[in-house]
Image (spheres, rainbow, N blue to C red):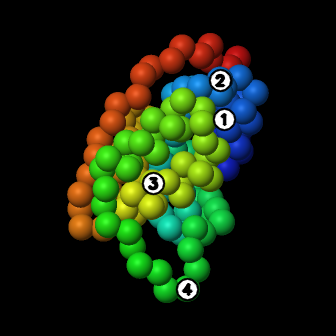
Amino acid sequence: MNAIEAIQNAMQRAEVGRPKVGGFPYLAECLRQAGATRNVWHLPSCQSLFYTDKGIVVIQGQPLVSGFADVPPYNESALVTAIRRDQAGETTFGEFLTGTWEAGVVSYEVDFINRTVEYVGAFGESYLEEYPMVEIPAES
């Protein structure tokens, strides 16, 4: 199985078993088990890089803006609100991305080994959050 197939399979596996509330740790564990070590998102382009033990995979999502746009100022309080709403299952992933962008986040990195997500603003401001470990039986 190549890197793209590993990421696609992990995402499909997570979609089937992932709970609506607190679903991110489940997704993250599926990706970790598939060999992903980190995931870097670039906003507002919605480009995502998955670093895996089989290679690096890029996913180009639908950009949040087009043409020229002002970068919103970094607002940690708004960022935490966007994160908590997502964790509570109150938003779609697209709404989560929009909320983090509107909070001034230009990129974020998920570390699947240390179970952290670091959100970064345009001037290097950052917010680090740990996410809980979840137990998912490994695929045979």
Indicate which disc residue 56 carries.
Answer: none
The number of discs equals 4
The amino acid sitting under disc 2 is: Pro
Q: Earlier in the sequence, mark 4 or mark 2?
A: 2
Residue 22 against residue 54 in the figure, above or below: above
Q: Give residue 8's position: percent from left, percent from top.
A: 70, 43
Tell us which disc is closer to us: 1 or 4.
4
Q: Position of residue 126 (x, y in %)?
A: 26, 52
Q: Nearer the viewer, residue 115 or 24?
A: 24
Q: What is the spatial separation of the Cα atoms under label 3 and label 4, in whole angstroms?
A: 19 Å
Q: Nearer the viewer, mark 2 or mark 3?
A: 3
Identify the secondary structure beneath mark 4. loop
Q: Is residue 77 above or below residue 114?
A: below
Q: Residue at x 59, y 25 (%)?
A: 21
Local secondary structure at mark 2 = loop
Give the residue at x 54% y 69%.
45
Tag 3 secondary structure = helix
Location of mark 1 (residue): 10
Amino acid type at mark 4 = Gly
Q: Residues within 10 Å of mark 1 (few under 14, many from 20)?
A: many
* Residue located beneath label 2 in the image: 19
Between residue 120 and residue 11, name the one nearer to us: 120
Q: Residues within 10 Å of mark 2 (few under 14, many from 20)?
A: some
Pointer 3 residue: 100
Identify the mark nearer the N-term, 2 or 3: 2
For marks 2 and 1, give the one nearer the viewer. Answer: 2
- The type of residue carrying mark 3 is Thr
User: Does residue 23 appear left or right of residue 38 in this picture?
Assistant: right
* Residue 67 tag number: 4
What is the spatial separation of the Cα atoms under label 1 and label 4, in whole angstroms? 33 Å
